[in-house]
């Protein structure tokens, strides 16, 4: 997708919500004037709120969808951190959005071994998060995402901890809740060029690759012609 198309899509950002002392910017992308659009909640950390993947994803899935970007910088699954997603305003707004599809991309910040979280705490907190969405009246289909690789540990995040703990725990969450899994790790493990700045956050090409992988997992059989590929 070229830059002009992305800027055009960004023009659909329509709402800023201010709650208490916290300022939360909610980006809604899509045609809200259409009758009964399918509401998609993109939940996550800076890999969601700080990249263009939700906009790229909307460009792929089409105008009968509305995507809400509910990412929060630095958010973790673990409730014992300084910024657990369970405590954020973004979660409350996402639930009020009453999505029919929820895509949760969390866990990267939990790969900080200084958190000293146990595997059981991560799983239990993630299950609570999934349960909150599954309990909504809109009865959304929930997808939990295995995060992309961490290519540089200078940020304080451990690539090994991500692989050995976080990703298996996400699979356990899926098994316990019935959520489906999107694997970003394996398709991107040989593509460090998509993460040039800090080895954690994707550039625009990497964000588009993430969107394509999500599209293929969630939407490719939903009245679309074919799956796309993020790689040459």
Image (cartoon, grey):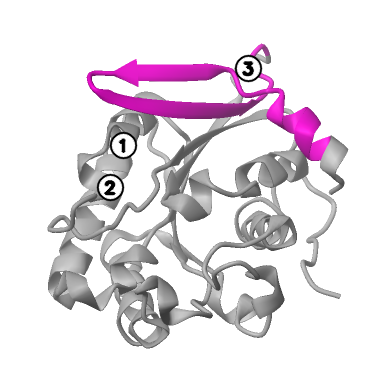
Q: Residue at x 77, y 39 (%)?
A: 6
Q: Position of residue 145 (x, y in %)?
A: 46, 63
Q: Which residue is mark 2?
A: 85
Q: Quadrant of residue 178?
A: bottom left
Q: Decide: is 119 above or below 58.
A: below
Q: CA distance from mark 2 to mark 3?
A: 27 Å
Compared with residue 33, is residue 143 higher up or lower down, i.e. above or below? below
Classify 47 as above or below 97: below
Residue position marked by numbered label 3 in the rendering? 32
Q: Secondary structure at mark 3?
A: loop
- Residue 127 position, x and y percent, is 23, 57
Q: Which residue is mark 1?
A: 91
Q: What is the C-alpha distance between the residues marked 1 and 3?
A: 21 Å
> Does the CB distance between marks 2 and 1 fall below 8 Å?
yes
Is residue 113 one of those drawn in magenta? no
Marks 1/3 in contact by CB < 8 Å: the verdict is: no
């Amino acid at each position: 997708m070229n830059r002009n198309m992305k800027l055009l899509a960004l023009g659909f950002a329509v709402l800023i919500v201010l709650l208490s002392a916290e300022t939360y910017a909610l980006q809604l992308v899509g045609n809200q004037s259409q009758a009964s659009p399918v509401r998609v909640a993109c939940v996550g950390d800076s890999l969601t709120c700080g990249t263009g993947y939700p906009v790229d994803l909307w460009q792929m899935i089409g105008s009968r969808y509305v995507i809400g970007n509910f990412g929060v910088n630095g958010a973790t699954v673990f409730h014992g951190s300084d910024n657990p997603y369970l405590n954020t305003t973004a979660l409350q707004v996402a639930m009020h959005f009453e999505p029919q599809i929820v895509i949760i991309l969390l866990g990267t910040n939990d790969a900080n071994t200084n958190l000293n979280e146990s595997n059981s705490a991560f799983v239990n907190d993630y299950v609570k998060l999934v349960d909150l969405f599954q309990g909504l009246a809109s009865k959304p289909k929930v997808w939990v995402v295995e995060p992309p690789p961490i290519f540089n540990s200078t940020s304080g995040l451990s690539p090994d901890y991500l692989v050995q703990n976080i990703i298996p725990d996400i699979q356990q969450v899926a098994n316990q809740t019935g959520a489906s899994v999107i694997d970003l790790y394996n398709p991107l493990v040989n593509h460090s060029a998509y993460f040039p700045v800090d080895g954690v956050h994707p550039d625009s090409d990497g964000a588009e690759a993430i969107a394509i992988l999500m599209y293929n997992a969630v939407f490719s059989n939903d009245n679309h012609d074919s799956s796309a590929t993020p790689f040459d």
